[in-house]
Image (tube, grey):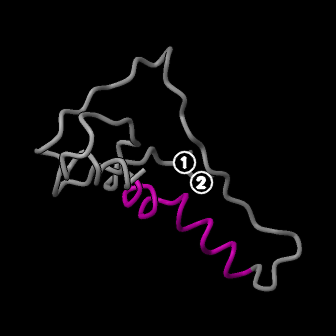
Amino acid sequence: MKGVVAKVQLGEADAGVVYRSDVTPGIAARFRILDIPAAANIVASYPIVILAASGAPGAARAFVELVRGAKGRATLARHGLSPPPAAP
């Protein structure tokens, strides 16, 4: 998707559809962002799991907890991504 942003930036395309997170703060002012109505929007979701056969289950668990915790959620939001549900 970042290739689409680059094409529009270079004037090689008049418009493109990309994830909001592909339009970084440094270039956002040069783009007109249109929201897609919820009824027509498809939200991408990325599962996060710990594999049963993980060679490092402790590190995997720590990573999942980081992503689902306050710091990870804030980092994702800062980059334009919807954070996952809060960790229980």
Which residue is outermost to the top?
39
Residue 35 found in image quarter? top left
Which residue is the site of mark 2?
87
* Disc 2, SS: loop
* Disc 1, SS: loop
The magenta region covers 58-76
Residue type indicated by callout 2:
Ala
Looking at the image, residue 51 sits to the left or right of residue 87; the answer is right
Residue at image point 49% right, 17% down: 40
x, y (%) of residue 57?
77, 79
x, y (%) of residue 77?
36, 51
x, y (%) of residue 76?
41, 56
For the residue pair 43 and 18, the one nearer the viewer reads as: 18
Residue at image point 41% right, 43% down: 19
Against 74, is 85 above or below?
Answer: above
Looking at the image, residue 32 sits to the left or right of residue 43; the answer is left
Magenta-drawn stretch contains 60 = yes
Residue 84 badge: 1
- Neighbor class of circle 2 (other Cα within 10 Å; few <14, some 14-19, many 20+) is few
Residue at image point 38% right, 54% down: 3
The answer to whether the residue labelled 2 contacts the one labelled 1, judged by CB atoms less than 8 Å apart, is no
Q: Main secondary structure of the magenta part?
A: helix
Looking at the image, residue 2 sits to the left or right of residue 29; the answer is right
Residue type indicated by callout 1:
Pro
Magenta-drawn stretch contains 51 = no
